[in-house]
Amino acid sequence: MTTEKSEVEDVFSRETAGLPEAVPPSVLRIDDGGRLNFHIRSVRKRINDAVVRMLAYNDSIPGPTLDVDQGSEITVNVRNDGDELTTVHWHGLRLENRYDGVPHDTQAPIAIGESFTYKVQFPDAGIYWYHPHLREDYAQEMGLYGSIVVHPTEKSFWPAVDREIVLVLDDVLIKDGQMAAFKRSGPTHTAMGRFGNVLLINGETQFSENAAIGEVVRLYLVNTANTRIFNFSIRGARMKLVGGDSGRHEREEFVDEVLVSPSERAVVDVLFESEGEVELEHGTPEKVYPLGSFSVEGAAAGDSAASFETLRVDPELSRERESIDTHLKRPPDKTLAFVASMPLLYGDAHATQSTSYACPMHPDVTAAEPGRCPKCGMTLIGVQATSITYSCPTHPDVTASEPGTCPKCSMRLVAVQAAAVTYSCPMHPDVTASEPSTCPKCSMKLVAVQAAALTYSCPMHPDVTASEPGACPKCGMKLIPGQPQTTAAGGSDSHTDHSPGHDEHEQSDGIEWEDLMPEINRASDNTNMFWKLTDRDTGHENGAIYWDFKVGDRVKIRLVNEMESDHPMHHPFHIHGAGRFLVLSRNGETEPNLAWKDTVLVRMGETVDILLDVSNPGIWMAHCHIAEHIESGMMFSFNVARA
């Protein structure tokens, strides 16, 4: 009873009774010197058939879109009547350091019932956003996010369009009609981040808008999801990529899709050329998710379509292109590695000699020796070999524990797996025993399985199975033993054997599009899953890293997403307002289209070189922008001194 009570007390409230209804988000035009009040509190919101408790700025999810001018400054007073300490981080803005919203680095957290006043400057045109920087895994997922459109001083900065729309992309995890529970004591889902099962666009499950034939609409895309990467496309209209995190791209280009990782932004212009429904979609290698649509009819009043075919070149970034050759060739000033340690799955397996090894994400991948999964790079887990007995083909009652011949007919005995019962944990299939017991990792009762029926599977890609231990060809994780997969009569078996020697290994694109090991991910937290940023020069990790720069420095930083890691996966790496950076190269290949950025996606196994243009003094943070990875410590701060 005491344990059950403490577990209930450790969960944030999901009660909706008596809460105000969430309202549609608004656009607030704020001139230079203007003032704005933000009120944080709980609201109730309908998402499909569920009515859920969420958090909101000024009762809307997303919060208000701030419509401001480049070079302006506004004052924002934030009152916190939510259920957790908070701050507001103004993502991507090179503002005064003390208003950056990093708890303890730049300000004290805003206590419940208290307020804090921010002075927010907008030196760069583009699309930005705001969100908390305390318990991001909870507060941001619950609805605390909003966008900022900064209009350029230069009138011809962007191509001509007829109108502009902000699209905020997100997802939420809803179970049994409620937001899936969050623990007050700390985050869960730290292995992969909390994937939602409902996709949201501007806070709703479907987007709907009208457009005219010949109209050009600018879409500002903002990904506020905890961990999900969106691959945005429009079916039935033409799309031109014109900008990103902090302004224009070096060269405008026509595109079919735009990849936007958590906290990244993209600016696309869309030309509607024919009548009908134009579909907005998020596409992965396995599935297409509908996001909404434009209904196109009638003729556009404007003439923006006349210049849509023109692909412009940005003069500032063209000059940067001419000057970066030196930086491309020189060694990095800093090298930062992304590494995971996953005792939840592997425990002491690294130090224990096992007879076979398997990937926990791709259980079909097995090996006879320690190694890594060729699919995902995860360390293979040591597993116990199943018992082997020997029997006579014609007299199956004749068995032996060693090779020999049948005393009845002298035929050679053949090897078979023993029919003895073993026991394994449903949540941690690498935990096995020869007798009934409980799992030392999660205390669940071990269930009986036939040793003869033992198969191996990947915890991340359970469709990948094998009859022998090995490593997952999709993600590199060790295969773990589990119960066999059966196929119904007349059905098809979707489980594919990828044992060593199989010639159909899938090639990973370095992105985890979905939560492929939900039970393990849900069980992961800060005690059993550790994400690390490691300074390759000093060996310091996470908060122990401390860099010193000064205004005017141009710092080449090499980001190495290690495959030598328990769980290799993608990471969107974000640097706060110390400056902005250019992506120089990916895996040694020069970046073809430059853009000023504050966040870059580093795929599994990828090495990305960036050039940080340091322009703003203060103490600034850098971190992975998967919310659960931030909360697990994958962050550090560095100092920028005045020139």
Image (cartoon, rainbow, N blue to C red):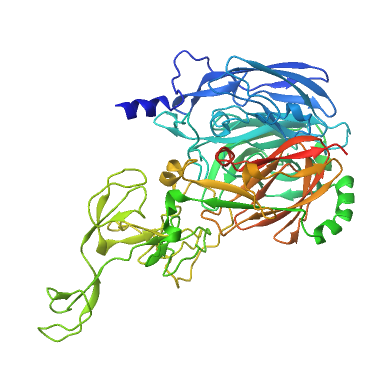
Above or below, 147 relative to 372: above
Residue drawn at x 67%, y 23% is: 64
> Can residue 587 be seen at all in this image of the molecule?
yes
Q: Quadrant of residue 393?
A: bottom left
Viewer-closest of 564 and 201: 564
Q: Residue furthest bottom?
A: 410
> In screen coordinates, is 81 left or right of 398?
right
Residue 357 pos. (x, y %): 41, 64
Question: Where does the image place residue 246, in percent across and percent down from the top left?
Answer: 77, 39
Outermost left residue: 408
In the rendered image, which quarter contains the C terminus? top right
In this view, the residue in front, 218 or 345, is 345
**Considering depth in this image, is 295 or 68 the residue closer to the camera?**
68
Q: Find residue 502 and report its horizontal and vertical position in percent.
A: 45, 70
Residue located at (46% from left, 31% from top) = 183
Q: Is residue 282 left or right of residue 419?
A: right
Q: Quadrant of residue 98?
A: top right
Residue at 64%, 45% in the rendered image: 572
Q: Is residue 549 above or below residue 46?
A: below
Q: Position of residue 409 (x, y in %)?
A: 12, 85
* Residue 233 showing in the rendered view: no
Residue 142, above or below 615: above
Q: Quadrant of the N terminus?
A: top left
Observer-nearest of 98 and 544 = 544
- Quarter where residue 469 is shown: bottom left
Looking at the rendered structure, the number of numbered marks drawn on it comes to: 0
Apparent side of residue 407 relative to residue 183 in the rendered image (left or right): left
